[in-house]
Amino acid sequence: MNLVMSEKMVVEKSEKLVAVKGMNDILPPDSARWEWLEDKVRSLMGLYAYRNIRTPIIESTALFVRGTGETTDIVEKEMYSFEDKLNGELLTLRPENTPGVVRASIEHNLTYEGGKRLYYMGPMFRHERPQRGRYRQFYQLGAEALGFAGPEVDVELMLLVHQLFANIGLRNVRVELNSLGVPSERQTHRAALIGYFEKHLELLDGEALRRLHTNPLRILDTKNPTMQALVQEAPQLLSFLGDASLQHFETVKTLLSACGVRWRVNPRLVRGLDYYSHTVFEFLTDELGAQGALCGGGRYDGLFELLGGKPTPAVGWGMGLERVLELIKQQGQEPVALNPDAYAVIAIAAAMPLAMKALQALRAAGVSVQQNAAAVPGFASMKSQFKKADASGARYALIFGSDELAQNYVTIKALRDRGGEQITRSLDGIATWATTLQLHP
Ligand code: HAM
């Protein structure tokens, strides 16, 4: 980007600088929920042998135009695209990461020795109208299985989501499925669909008319109430599928049921991205208003070729983490506690070296300790330090004063229970007693 400031970029000194609309700061204590969720994700991904992939946030614009699809909402109107004025390249902040993962896989020949199971977590950018659950920068968790053709991998990916939601205690999430078959089946269906809608042109809204010859499948997705009856009666792609596609879909359904996942076929589920074939699915909730899609994905067997790679079957999903966290909150789960185990009260400057060394040893032994610190240089009164110790939520105060310094010990005061009991412990043997202070040993 051009780093020379244009007149427009010069900011009045008095102007208040705030975050870009639709892009949120994630602050403590809320950020603790994010970390908690990310930890759950990492351990679950390990159990399914999915490995982490990190691709750049900026990719060439052409990747999304070709990969996500020219006639999708994302490419038509939601991308943050710009020209790198240093070299004229056309770049885009990633609106989704499936094309990026496929690009990386082709570039590094990731599937050379066989299939790869990958996952990522990170920000995506879409210039949509911000509202609850819909942001311009949002975080997606995604999983992509590259190089596997069988329906069992479609199911494995859905089981991952199902298991993650169970592990974090989400309730009332439903699973909708559909099959989009293969390109030749979609072509025949497309012709039938256009023929059907052309017979009812007077019932189509502007958006549908615009899509009629570019992306008629997406008309089935319409939210317009006056078109519902029309799309209900429209030819269904499922009835255009051949034996192989039907067999793939049947196996997905059978395996899901065998694993205890309840699903429903929604013949109008078409997804908003162009690359899908065979299975598509969404995990939905009714408890978040209009933005009820928590996770969506499907098979994209043609994308590697479209992006210049060898034919490689693939399947994956993306999940909006803001929506998942919002639902957790809405369903009344307690926030994650951020309390340290102990709070260090330091009475005199001379005790500081001894205290800080002791705190390091405690942390090395796994005890979380918050050290008192004042807004101005100097030492706050013991009363004020104890007030902060209380407010921190710590279970113990660790006191370092002149007696402690003289005799090399620390006084440990219980703040929450045991009637404020005080004990002393030698600083020589920290490792032997440290873990007794841990809240979660
Ligand atoms: P997607 O359906 O566009 O699919 O997005 C996946 C999920 O990201 C949505 O279900 C939603 O939870 C979340 N999401 C999307 N847009 C926003 C937004 N503006 N604000 C908050 N959350 C949002 C994909 O992106 C595909 N790459 C999924 C995939 C992976 N398919 C195959 N592999």
Image: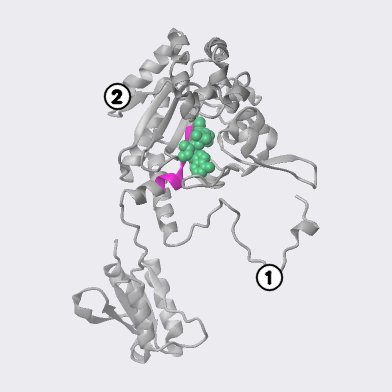
In the structure shown, which secondary structural element does the residue marked by tag 1 occupy? loop
Question: In terms of depth relative to the viewer, which is nearer, 44 or 320?
Answer: 320
On screen, 40 above or below 399?
A: above
Residue identified by numbered label 2 = 257
Residue identified by numbered label 1 = 14
State the image coordinates of residue 283 (x, y, percent, origin top left): 39, 34
Q: Work out how far the residue at label 2 is from the one at label 1, CA to CA, in angstroms.
A: 61 Å
State the image coordinates of residue 111 (x, y, percent, origin top left): 55, 28
Q: Residue furthest front?
A: 202
Is there any visible trace of residue 118 in the rendered image? no
For badge 1, the amino acid type reads Ser
Residue bounds of the magenta highlight = 317-325
Quarter of the image holding residue 401? bottom left
Left or right: where does residue 280 sit relative to residue 61?
Answer: left
Residue at (79, 47) in percent of width and height: 85
Where, quadrant-wise, is the C terminus in this rendering? bottom left
Left or right: where does residue 213 sit relative to residue 87?
Answer: left
For badge 2, the amino acid type reads Ser
Residue at (43, 37) in percent of width and height: 293
State the image coordinates of residue 9 (x, y, percent, origin top left): 75, 58
